[in-house]
Image (cartoon, rainbow, N blue to C red):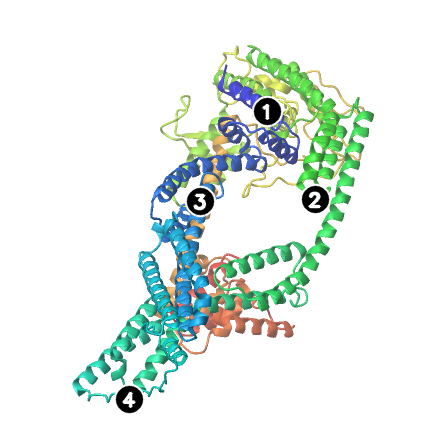
Amino acid sequence: MTSSSTKSLDIQALDTLTGGAFTAPTSGERAQRIRDWLAGQPTAEQLQDVFKELSGRDKGAARPVREKLDEIRRAKGQEVIAAEWAQKAEALLAQPKLNIADALAWQRDAAKAGAPLSREPLTGFKARLADRVKGIEDLQHRAQVHREAAVLLAQRFEVLSTKGWKDAQAAEEALRGDVTHWQQQADEIAADVNWTSLDGKFAPQLEASRAQLLSVSDAFHAALAQAVAAANDAAAALPPVPVWADELRAARGEVVAPKAAPAKPARPPVDPAVRAAAQEAVQAALAKLEQETAEGHGKASAGAAAALRAVLKEHGKLVESELESRVHAALVAAGELEGWQRWSADKVREDLVAKAEGLLKRPEGQALGGRKMQETLRALRDQWKQSDQGGVPNHALWKRFDEACNEAHKVVEAWLEKVRADAAEHRAQRLALIEEVKTWAAAHADAADLKAHNRALHQFADRWRDAGHVGEKVFAELQPQWNEAFGAARAPFESAQKSSVERRQAMIAEAVELGAAPMLRIDAVKALQQRWQAEAQGVPLDRRQEQKMWDAFRAPIDEAFNRKTAEREKVSSAMSEHDRNVLLASKALEAANATGDAQKIRVAMNQLEAAMRGEKVQIAEAPAKAAPAATSHLNTVEAAPPAQAAQAAEAEFAESAGLAQTSGEGDQSAAPTTAAEAHDLVAPEGSADAAASGDAAGDAAPAPAAPPVAAPKPVVAMRRADDRPGMRKPEPAMAGRGGRPGDRGGDRRDSRGAGGPGGRPDRAGAPGGDRGGRFGDRGASPRFEDRGPRLGDAAFRAQRDAVEHAQAALRKLAAQAHGEALTQLLGAWEKRDAAALPSVQELGRAVSPAVRGAWSQALGSTPAGNPQDALLRLEIAAEVPTPAEHVDARRAMQLQLLTKRNEPTPAQTWGQDAARVLAGSHDASTARRLQNVLKALLKS
């Protein structure tokens, strides 16, 4: 089994695997079958094989396969990343003391690394870490609140100590219960699992609050018990609380003297050095705070503020009032900086409110559509949620934002209503199309015109594709129904295609058998080609599949023709005298091409043309490959037969080459690729044509040096004119009715006319070859020019290649001469030397002697004048670009020229304009512009 057949079997297997995706008639159906196949979760190896074959056939249908492969590749990479970050999350959760910053950094770094946080197990770890962080933050908040509760309880004790002892006695039990409850809550906080994850400062603070509260409570209860005892026993000691002691004294009848305010002790004088040191310490701390506040460092400013408060607490009494006011202002500013988060959140909210209110206030023609409005509103609400997480909620701004979003959402509701209505309509259309396909399939189950059947299927598929948008659920519901109906409608066509493929495979086998036969049967080849054409026109296949089968069909036939051509070339060893002369002339032309001399090349080309016409010319024979029969290095070319021989050769090749061509895809019939092969299809064995082309291998007689003028061969095919650039065109044929035997100069019946054996006169008594036309002038003049006798393949190819090389060499020499002349002209202008100006022959036919004389006179004069206008006229005449700085001037000149009708155009006066430029001074920019202009004008 060959590699091509193995690949064909692989494609058939893949087509079966994908549910017919490779043989589907349209790209849309291929894509749909691929999507249906992907829904079955194929393996990665199957996906790779299908993508490898399908990507070269239909990139659109292969896109879902590529996306599936990319998804699998990403999933494999993400599994590794997920496992790595899952281990890190487990390590964090296993720590007895969890740092909140580490937990937040895990989520941030995992997202940067591309870990799939939205899939398990990372989703679970993310939730567990979030719960752990939330528990730590809640416990921290409870500890702070509990410290404040201890302060409040202590303040209640202090307040009761300023009232009567009976009021304190009434509230004593309640206070005792509150203190007990506070202690229980403090124990619960300390026993929490997250207590070890809190900052180290919270545990000492809570213990200090507990100790302070208990000491205040114990002192309060002891003083109250002493007051109760003093009230019951007049000899008992009074409590240490002044208010209660005074109350008890009054109850005992003692006189209570008012207490005088204690006199303030006089301040001792402060040493100036101490005051100066205090001032300097406060100023240093103040400068640090002001610097951090100005730079916006919130964390650093908080530390600087704490340091300033500590310094102020120590040296506050020694600070002057002016410095003290500066200190308070800096502390206020630092406090505002600490509250930046709340301010920033409100700023973001105000921006979101402005955006929401501006959704319905857009300029005319720029209103948002339904889908865009829906996406914008969703994004705005998500941003609002994020702002609420970073600061205290602002209900006033939220009310404005919500009202604006609700008003804008009316556009979304209208759009959704329209989408639902359109979806319902599209669903009804698709259901109607499915029913129509079912009805059509039942009516055309036995269709004979398969092309019309295939066209109708394509139209149904296009209508389904253009039936409008429906939702994913509706499409998932309708697509299986459509596949079933369309598959039933396509079943007869697919069955016919399968049968056609089998028949074509059989014809390919026949073609292989015919090509392998020792004798190529032309009639069998033609019949097989006609059968293939009938099959191809009757049953259409996929373009790629049809082209592949067609290539397999034509390959053995083309190989057989090539083999026959090679055999013919081996047999035809004798070369005619005319071919040898043409070969010698071609070699002489190639030698002239190598010299690079245009005169020699033209002489050699004329000699080659004369040799091809069969005229007598003197051609120097190449010494390396001289003819063995020649006794001198010169050959005399004899006169060629009449023009009918060339016409016969041309007609023979054109007619035979048009019989059966295999090169094109549209005309699918095996054909030879050379003139000799075409000759085999037309000229029978033993005919004059076959003998002339070298098919008669048994004729061992050597070809004579100067063959006599024989009767003209019958015209079988004619070589059409060479339409390549530079090749000579044939003269137009004379007017007359073409296609009839009497209209051709070299009629097929010439061999049976007066010039050959068995010739017979026509009805007017003239020989067949000289019979007059309808008006007496049909045979008076030939329809084609006299091109000489027919050339063999080697001579024809040699003269063709030599002429092509000669034309290319002449073009190259002409371009070089043109460039050298232009360089000499610019050099003469730069040196102001009229003698260095090229001649008229060097400048070319575009420059007349009068123009060259004007240029010579301009170069011989003193530089004067401004050549800008002349340069602009030259650029307009040559139609070359103008530098950007002169474009406005060129447009103005073009407008002026439009108004001057009778004045000559720049294309008519470019020689005088060039003389004006040459009369001016030389500079680099002007020289470049003149060179670009003359480069185009001298070629015209």
Kindly identify which residue carries mark 1: 15
Callout 2 environment at 10 Å: few (<14), some (14 to 19), or many (20+)? Answer: some
Which of the marked residues, 1 or 4, is nearer the chain's N terminus?
A: 1
Task: Give the CA separation, mark 2 to mark 4.
Answer: 94 Å
Residue type at mark 2?
A: His
Residue type at mark 1?
A: Asp
Callout in the foreground (2, 4): 4
Q: Position of residue 746 (x, y in %)?
A: 67, 28
Which of the marked residues, 2 or 3, is nearer the chain's N terminus?
A: 3
- Depth check, front residue: 120 or 523: 120
| Element carrying mark 4 | loop
Task: Give the CA separation, mark 3 to mark 1.
Answer: 49 Å
Callout 4 environment at 10 Å: few (<14), some (14 to 19), or many (20+)? Answer: few
Which of the marked residues, 2 or 4, is nearer the chain's N terminus?
A: 4
Kindly identify which residue carries mark 3: 128
Kindly identify which residue carries mark 4: 263
Q: Position of residue 865 (x, y in %)?
A: 45, 78
Residue type at mark 3?
A: Arg
Q: Quadrant of residue 588?
A: top left
Which of the marked residues, 3 or 4, is nearer the chain's N terminus?
A: 3
